Amino acid sequence: MSHVTLLLPPETERKLRYQASLQGQTLEVYLQKLAEREAALVNGVPPATGKSPTFDELTAPISQAVEPTGMSDEEVGKFFEEVVEERRAERRSKMK
């Protein structure tokens, strides 16, 4: 791991220490996690928010992909059931 030295105005340091203490972290750990979250954004990876996504958030990409196909809910359900069964069969065959 590399070392970085930051020169912060005293008020900024005080605010950051306060934020770190609210999360039960040292300033160093807080800043490291902050930097890691920002670096992840650069690579297109969303930061962990600490909350679970809603069902709609999880399924939005699927809904957007299926909508133009005109498939009914039943057809989509059947399609996913078939895909899941195929994957299970593949896994079972690899276990043998």
Image (spheres, rainbow, N blue to C red):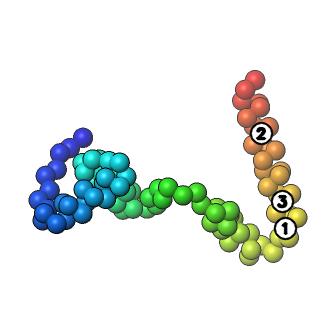
Label 3 sits on what residue type?
A: Gly
The image quarter containing residue 15 is bottom left
Q: Which residue is mark 1?
A: 73
Q: Nearer the viewer, residue 2 or 5?
A: 5
Callout 2: helix, strand or loop? helix
Q: Are marks 1 and 3 in contact (CB under 8 Å)?
A: yes
Q: How far is the residue under mark 1 from the one under mark 2?
A: 23 Å
The quadrant of the picture occupied by the C terminus is top right
Within 10 Å of the Cα at label 3, are there few (<14), some (14-19), or many (20+) other Cα atoms?
Answer: few
- Is residue 60 left or right of 92 when viewed as pictured? left
Residue 31 can be seen, yes or no: yes
Q: Nearer the viewer, residue 32 or 45?
A: 32
Residue 65 can be seen, yes or no: no
In this picture, is 20 found above or below 87? Answer: below
Q: Which residue is mark 3?
A: 77
Residue at 83% x, 59% y: name it.
Answer: 77
In this picture, is 95 found above or below 83? Answer: above
Residue at 79% x, 37% y: name it.
Answer: 89
Q: Position of residue 79 (x, y in %)?
A: 82, 57
- Is residue 95 left or right of 1 when viewed as pictured? right
Q: Nearer the viewer, residue 26 or 6?
A: 26
Q: Which residue is mark 2?
A: 88
> Residue 17 bears which disc, if any?
none
Q: How far is the residue under mark 2 from the one under mark 3?
A: 16 Å
Which of marks 2 and 1 precedes in the sequence?
A: 1
Q: Position of residue 80 (x, y in %)?
A: 79, 55
The image quarter containing residue 61 is bottom right
